Amino acid sequence: MLKAFKNKSAKRFQLYKRNKNDELTLFQHTIILSLIENGCSQYQVAWTMGVSVSTISKIVKKFREKGQVDDLPRSDRYKLLSPVEEKKICEMIVPEQCETAVDVHAKFCQETNKQISVEIIRNVLQNNGYTVKVKRRHSGLTNKHKKERDVFNDANIILTKPFGGGSIIVWGCITSEGCKIELVEETLNSAGYIQILEDCLLDVLDSCDCADKMIFQHDNARVHTSIATKTWLEDNNISVLEWPA
């Protein structure tokens, strides 16, 4: 029976199909009550009209209790502001004195002792043709300031060397009593390294009180492990601690 009803009412379902938020018309209310009076179930009517079963149940209950088919008139939403107050808000817009919705809100609440939100002020202004614009922020610098800054920059900026500023190599002997640094100006080889040891390392040993207990350590660079470097260290009686790596 239900299958036959669905097949028979398929065209009617397409005719009365509506959007989800649309309200049923008086004609559709009449059709619903007519189907119910003819013995159709609320589920069948809901399927035919394209609405929920709860909607059909409310329509039937309202008709049986109050005898009304159409919807009852609804009251309008309560307005916080009267037309006179809305006009007063628009008249508060004064250039260079009261330009933003926040300014209007503060002035309106102070004069009327009425507490409303800033969003309501914005809605009133927009409904009366006022557009919302974000005030552009300026740095505060005039053309004179910018010209003086350019002159100052040209006179005081030290330009860097393009593509890098080169490199520098230093050798340092670190002890518990300080550090002595030697600038390496050329590519370091065994002879140059031995010269650094003679100029710096021996000077450090002479200036330290515990030179006889010192142990020298350097890494496994080629100039450090060369035969000439090892021979020089042995000739000068310098104890060397092997590099662990």
Image (cartoon, rainbow, N blue to C red):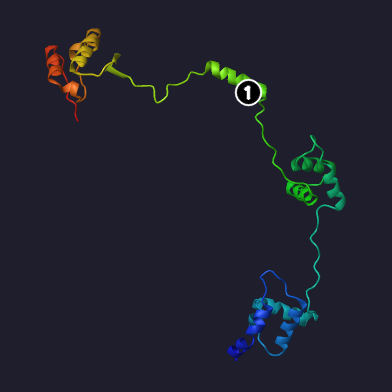
Would you identify the image quadrant in which residue 67 lies?
Answer: bottom right
Displayed quadrant of residue 36: bottom right
Give the answer, above or below, for where 7 lies relative to 81.
Answer: below
Q: Position of residue 127 (x, y in %)?
A: 78, 52
Q: Which residue is drawn at 12% across and 20% down?
A: 227
Number of numbered callouts drawn = 1
User: Residue 32: x and y, percent?
Assistant: 72, 82
- Quadrant in which residue 110 is drawn: top right
- Which residue lies under the disc numbered 1? 146
Between 2 and 184, the one lying in front of the other is: 184
Residue at the image position 21 percent from the left and 16 percent from the top: 193
Front-lying residue, 206 or 21: 21
The N terminus: image quadrant: bottom right
Residue farthest to the front, as pictured? 162
Viewport quadrant of the C terminus: top left
Along the line of sight, the residue nearer the viewer: 183 or 159:
159
Q: Is residue 209 left or right of residue 124?
A: left
